[in-house]
Amino acid sequence: MLNNTSVNTRLIGLVLFLSLISIVVGVMGLRGMASTVAGLQTVYDDRVVPLRDLKVIADMYAVNIVDASHKVRNGNFTWEEGRKNVSEAQKVIDEKWKAYKGTVLVEAETKLVGEIEPMMETTNKQIDDLMAIMTKEDAEAIAAYTRGPLYPAIDPISGKFSELIEVQLSVAKEEYLSGKDSYNLARSVSIILLVGGIALGLLSALWIVRSVVG
């Protein structure tokens, strides 16, 4: 026959066991949420924002430099407007590129950055030549420039930025899949713990009740 002390001990043990299961499940849930939030944060900081910056850089080359050069040549832009567009492009490209390099770069990005930087130096020299032409307001020179050095200076580097954008999308997808896997693992472990804890708790409760009745 069980005495009161033995019954109390078993009941307390059962409560502690169920409480422990609840704590473990809760901790795992919090860790899973923290991991998900961290994954979303890195996707935003290191993928979404850089994507925006790379798009801005590409637009600066395509619109503020290439398109503006043609508009100045065709008379759609004044020389002053052309100089303003090119100068703004140089400033924005420099700012966005520095910001991009300050993010977490994967190996593929680091490799592309190493290829792009020498190309940017060459392109910057060509852009300086363009600014010199616009400063002199030389119509013949701007016409020759748009037919000659403009596209060979801009097109290769624009292609490299397209590659960087593809890398960003690929890494963002990997981050999503990794977060999904972590969520599935945490969910599976939590379900197993809950089912196991409930089953053991019921068995323990039945055992205590039968002991008391006996």
Image (spheres, rainbow, N blue to C red):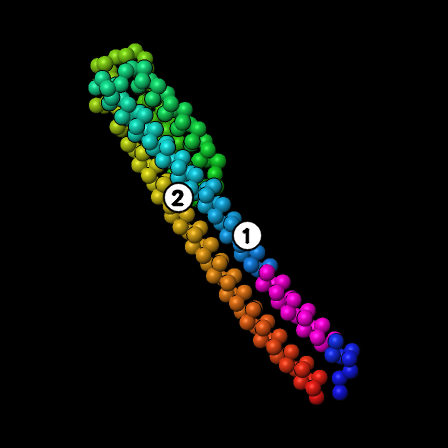
Amino acid type of the residue tagged 1 in the rendering? Ala
Q: Which residues are magenta?
A: 9-26
Label 2 sits on residue: 168
Mark number, residue 34: 1
Q: Is residue 111 above or below residue 87?
A: below
Viewport quadrant of the C terminus = bottom right
- Nearer the observer, disc 1 or disc 2? 1
Q: Is residue 177 above or below residue 116?
A: below
Q: Nearer the viewer, residue 210 or 114?
A: 210
Mark number, residue 20: none
Residue 64 appears at what percent x and percent y? 32, 25
Residue at the spot 42% in from the left edge and 42% down from the top edge? 48
Q: Quadrant of residue 116?
A: top left
Would residue 82 be found to the left or right of residue 211 on screen? left
Q: Is residue 18 above or below residue 87?
A: below
Labels 1 and 2: the sequence-earlier one: 1
Q: Is residue 24 magenta?
A: yes
- How many angstroms separate mark 1 from mark 2 (CA)? 23 Å
Q: Quadrant of residue 117?
A: top left
Say which element carries label 1.
helix
Give the main secondary structure of the magenta stretch: helix
Q: Is residue 202 magenta?
A: no
Residue 34 appears at what percent x and percent y? 55, 52
Residue 189 appears at what percent x and percent y? 53, 65
Residue 94 appears at what percent x and percent y? 42, 27
Viewport quadrant of the N terminus = bottom right
